[in-house]
Amino acid sequence: MSRTIAAIARTVLALLALAVLAGFTAGVPWLLIVAAGWPLDWIGWPQPDAVPTLTDLHAAITSPWSDTTVFALLATIGWVLWAQFLRDTTIEIIETSAATRASRRGQPRPPASGRGPIRWVAAVLVGAIVGAVLFDAARAVTTPTAGAAAADAAARRPAVAVAPAHPAALPTVEHGPRPALTIGVSATNATGPLTTHRDSPATVPSWARDAPGGTHRVVAGDNLWDLAAKHLDDPHRWREIYKLNRGHEQANGYALTDPDEIHVGWILALPAHKAAPAATPPHTQDPPPDSPDTTAPEANETAPAIPPPAPPASATTPEPSPSPPTAEPSAPADSADAATPAPDTDPSDDQPTDAAGITLPAQGWISLGLAAAIAALAALLRLQRRRRARLTFPAPVRTAPQRSPMPPFLAPVDIIGSRHLGLSSDHRPASPAIAAPIGVNSDGAEMSLFHLPGPGVALHGNGAVPAARAILASVLTSGAVETASTRPVVVTTADLLAQLLPEDAPTVGLDPDGTAYDGERLIVLADTAAAITHAEEEMISRRRLLDTFDAETITDLNARTDHAETQPPYVPLIDSSPRHAARLQAIATHRATLNLHPVILGPHDGIPTIEINAEGVTSSDDEPCTVGRLSTLGADELAAILSMLTDAIARPEAGADVDDPPTETSPAAVTVEPHEAVPAQADDAAALVRLRVLGPVTVATDAGPIATGMRTGSYTALAVLAAHPAGRTLDQLAADLHPNADPTAAVKRVRTDITSARRVLRAATGHDEPMFIVYDPATGRYQLDPQTVTVDLWQMLTAIDQATTTDDDTAMLTALRRATELYGGDFAEGHDHPWATDYATSYRHQILTAYARIAEILEPDHPGQAVAALERAADLDPVNEELYQRIMRIHGRQQRPDAVRRTLRRLEERLADLGDAEPSQATRRVAERQLRPAGTVPGGRP
């Protein structure tokens, strides 16, 4: 009934549009002729057959105008508008007809642009008429007629068993197993109807290799109707299956020529689960969440029962396996479902199951805001490590990443929290969006300790102590990358801190008096009375500041720029004490005015008390609780965060002099994995494919860059394999790329990325034989084939290795320059994957050592070139102090004191972005030595 009403409405609308169009087309001219007659009389052209002369025109225009003349002018304008409307209507009819034809061919045209008001009227009228006609025509075409119904009935006829027409087998391909898994089908149900089977290489016909939706082996009871309903979610799409397989000879010698007859044992190619777009855009994004499954592990690709053996000593060529060279029992290299979209989604599917926070592996739950604050701290610590790294040549030539600053049990926090940080530069980490995030409210929104209602917060229940740990971590990590004057201050007691930290935990980060962490950021006092006294003194001091500057609140005072008395948030974290309840209440009363935020462990009268269970879920007896869940941490997690703060927060440092021998190894390449030998590849090595991972990940062939067809996930998978020449198992790749996704979905996604990469590379190179990504059955690892793929990272490391093995400075300089030319930027630049950060740091450090060695070779004869090399290195890593020491030393030897001062100032500016860090004492000593007049210190270091 509703369809009938809709059809009537469309018809009425079309008739109305047609009437209006006819009125404009025919009615307007009639009206103009009746009302005004010949419209050009006002310019001296009284009749159509009497063409006026120039004298007539001049006399008509210069003579006084009457009402009739004005009316004739308006009629002329009406004729012009009518002609414009007629022209626009004609254009719209042509455009609509062309768009309809293109749509039927699956090539939609872009919408017209630049329409004026008259053309918009024409477009609306033509669209209403044509739209109604096309819609009803489409309904007539798609509505099952008697013939269509008969065809659909034929498509429902089940498969039959037929003896082979001849014993000859179909030609087969020698590639790896072609899994024929399709969506929603259990691979273990091998007997029932609509069951998908896994086919060996000998059973998949070559014409079905690139079927967009995979393949299906026909079993008893199958028919095209049910297959389309099961695999394509629309039984009417059986015609697509029929067209895709029609005429192709099957293994029994017959071919599909009639939709009502399919044979048991046939392998049918399937179309894509979702209708493909008319124009194939570049695959720059991963598939949408509702994309179907693509591939599944082969029967012989199960995880090994024992850990895989260590990778071979050299990864130059893939280790031979019992299978043929092109066979790959582990990966669906050429699977017919290679083009099927992946079952998982864009990187957002890697989020934890709990959308509001992260459940830690050992103990605790933290909100995404706190995760972002901890990730910002980790980023700052990475920069501090880069600042302190020594540039010792030769450096180890390896692809292993830098050791992460996060302990393993906090690794998920670093990965997920990094995604919730804002934009950052290469030498300045981003600040979290919310200061002191402590949990989420009842609506799931992030909450800040500094914006809670009321005079403060009191914590009670089984989760009170874990919540206090999270609050302490949140306050201390807030503002870690900002200036020291804005960082919050926490005051607590020794007994309470001992309760929050592990038993017998070392007091890492305490000042020499043992009373404070990190320059008064965490003040540890003897007992609750001392802590309250300290808070009262702070309250009095802040009140005096407000009176002095005539400000209402500390927030107003901090917003002013006419003073240097910025007051950071002040957080007393103390136990509840009835003895000091009145004093504590007085402090809490001034919370909003003085930026004081008391946190009480235990119930307290006059301060809202939140009941917290072990999972951080809250409730309140006083009033409806606005806090939904508080972050909670274990003692070990809090101790790790405090240790990170100790290493990351800026403070005066002794540093290391460039002329002093290194006392510890470089932070790069610290790993627990076996050493992976780098394939030796010259920078001019020839191969079918050239992969660049230093800088944006790109893939090129002799024909040029591959600009379309490659999935985003394929690029990142190639980057990971480049960083692991010995290869990675599917589980390792899934853990690298999708650490927080469902493991099964992550493995399937990686499979699809590898399959897609192979397919695109084969199409781009025109070679169907190479695998490009080979599989080693002995180790269960995928690895790049160095015979068909060159990698700029491997070429760079090969050049550095050549430089380390020669004693000739000329040869060393040539090799190092080749290495620096190959370095195009940070590893996998532009891919938002936290896993790539530590790899990038490792490779950047290796190229910095190369530049440092180049400068050492060039300095005696070409000091200007030596400085230029170091300046280039400083552009790559603006915070490494040793680079600036080397530059100042060369300038000092060349008697350039102004250049020494400029270099030191530039370092000071760069380090100021690291939470107000300053050059180390060693760096300042290097600068002082270069600024001394020559010869003032006999025998001293330059």
Image (tube, grey):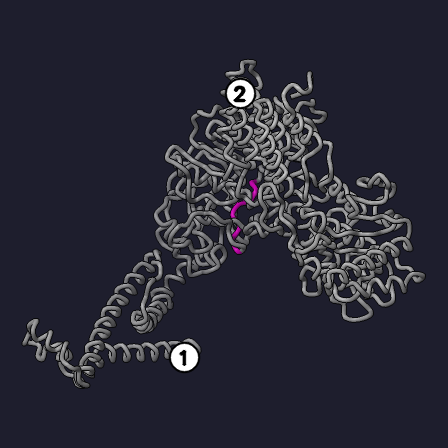
Q: In this orientation, which residue lies closer to the viewer: 336 or 460?
A: 460
> Quarter holding the C terminus?
top right
Would residue 522 be seen by someone viewing this image from the given angle? yes
Would residue 133 be seen by someone viewing this image from the given angle? no
Residue 249: percent from the left, percent from the top? 37, 44
What amino acid type should be assigned to the residue bearing mark 2? Leu
Q: Could you tell me which residue is drawn at 77 percent across and 62 percent down? A: 547
Spatial CA span between label 1 and label 2: 86 Å
Q: Could you tell me which residue is drawn at 84 percent across and 40 percent down? A: 507
Residue 301: percent from the left, percent from the top? 58, 38
Dot 1 surroundings within 10 Å: few (below 14), some, or many (20 or more)? few
**309 falls in the magenta region:** no
* Residue 260 - label: none
Asked where in the image residue 151 lies, by quadrant, the reply is bottom left
Residue 849: percent from the left, percent from the top? 59, 26
> Quarter holding the N terminus?
bottom left
Q: In this view, which residue lies farthest toward the right?
A: 579
Magenta residues (range): 290-298
Q: Mark 1, mark 2: which one is toward the viewer? A: 2
Q: Could you tell me which residue is drawn at 67 percent across and 33 percent down? A: 388
Q: Is residue 203 above or below residue 34?
A: above
Whichever of labels 1 and 2 marks the residue nearer the N terminus, that label is 1
Asked where in the image residue 253 lies, by quadrant, the reply is top left
Q: Is residue 285 above or below residue 604?
A: above
* Residue at image mark 1: 5
* Residue at image mark 2: 858
